[in-house]
Image (tube, rainbow, N blue to C red):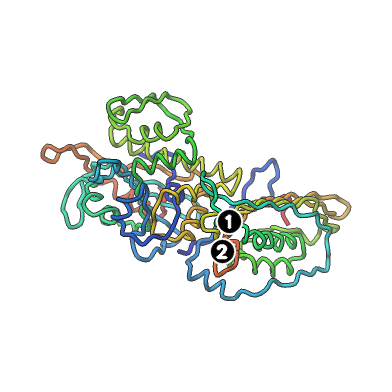
Amino acid sequence: MKVKPVQMVRTGWGRCVIVAILCLLVATVACDDRSESRVVSAPPVETQQPIKQAKWEIKTHPSAAVRQFTKREKHRVRAEKPKLKQLVRDVYDVLFLPSLVRQQVIRERFTPRAAAALLASGTGISDRLSDVKTTLRRAHIGIGAATVRQAAAQIWLHARATAGDKKVRIVHRSTLWLEKTGGRWKAIAFEVKQRPAA
Amino acid sequence: MIKRASALIVFVALVTGLVLNVGPRAATETAPIAIGRVHEQWQPHQGKIYVLVIGSDARNGNPNLRADAIHIAGINTDNMRGGILNIPRDSWVNIPGYGSAKINEALHLGGPELLARTLEDLTHIRLDLWAVVGFEGFQKIIKDVGPIPIHIRRPIYDPGGSGANINAGDRRLASDDALAFVRTRKAFAGGDVTRTTNQARFLLAMLHKLRSDVAERPTELLKWIAIAREHARMDISPQEMFRLAVITSQVKPPDIDNVTVPVRLGFVGAASVVFIRPGAEAMYRHFRKYASF
């Protein structure tokens, strides 16, 4: 099943939602397998403009129906936690970095369609901003306990920056829909709200 | 009759689970909820997904399955709009291989696959998936996801039929009341036509709850999927189900049209039936082209 990604720009969120994107990807398993076949190790993250980053607060939890989790489920979920935390760190450590660095990591951690949609979305920071400093980095990751192949992550990022002689506050919230195929987690879809946009 | 409302694939999205290679007939007989493919290849055409949602009268002691609720839900992923086409169960149609009969007979005669084929012949819409939900499965899902908020336009009192006794206004229907609401027919002047429209309204209400749950906490989607997985058997993969659920959770209920096929009452012999009016053709065409109305 292959469905075009959908992008949606909202005008709500207080008075000034600048960018909000929803990207939904539905691809065939075959298509995913193809995308997974070119798995490479994560590129080194280097930037010419290192920014001060706030400490990560990442919580993970199994997600299931109303029943209790089995020991096996707990064990399997525990095994996936570090991988999912790393994915979130990889993506959001570079979100406010120059576009070249961002592109590399996003292409690595998203399915091809989702990566293209995110890169086209205006998420991140504008080149005119300087002295970027993140002040909050928080993520909640829920892992489907039954299959341990699907997860959802909610991420909050706050940052401060300077545009000329003006101070800018950036507020970013996003949701990632994550799937494990070919032994590797990737974001298949996302929803982003950020103000101001890049 | 076109009303803003609804959304339904939630039902399907609600349901996710193991890949069990059981035949559709077997699935409907052994699980409170069953989901399957209409065709071997599930390859939605041009971003449109169509799901046949069947509410059956399956319950303890009733081995003869008939469809009490028949809906085709469509989502167009290009614009994230959709529609629900409601088909009254007494519609007099041609059932492939069996001749003319009430459409709800198709489930009994050949399972959800035959009902899907009947609807494909009728509407020329290529269906992707079917989902059959019995009384028990419906109640279990509502019990696990929690009461569904819905606006009841008029008091519903049907002690001799569905057992409904629901006051008008904004209500949160728990499993018993929810089942009574979607089953009530005799309390309405419009009978089965009103019932089928109400069923779609209820699906919309479920979608609304799913969306609000997911907006608050995205991981709620995984919970809904897990709940469905607990009660369903299906022959689509958990991955496909997850993606379908993600899509469904992003469709806004006001962007889904709730449409009931226009019919007129009639008789075939002594049997009371409804005949689908010729105007339905245009409806099918539009739905086929846009997955909405």
Q: Is residue B253 left or right of residue A102?
A: left
Chain of the residue displaying label 1: A
Query: Helix, strand or loop at disc 2?
Result: strand
Residue A158 visible in rendering: yes
Residue drawn at 83 percent across, 65 percent down: A49
The image quadrant of residue B194 is top left
Residue drawn at 39 percent across, 24 percent down: B155
Q: Is residue A41 above or below residue B135?
A: below
Whether tag 2 and tag 1 are in contact, CB under 8 A, the answer is yes
- Where residue B156 appears, x then y in whole percent? 36, 26
Of the pair B218 and A172, the residue shown nearer to us: B218
Mark 1 Cα-neighbour bin, 10 Å: few <14, some 14–19, many ≥20:
many
Amino acid found under the numbered disc labelled 2: Lys
Question: Which residue is identified by label 2?
Answer: A180
Residue A151 image label: 1
Please report whichever mark, 2 or 1, sits nearer to the chain's N-terminal start: 1
Of the pair A88 and B273, the residue shown nearer to us: A88
Residue B254 visible in rendering: no
Residue extending furthest toward the right: A165
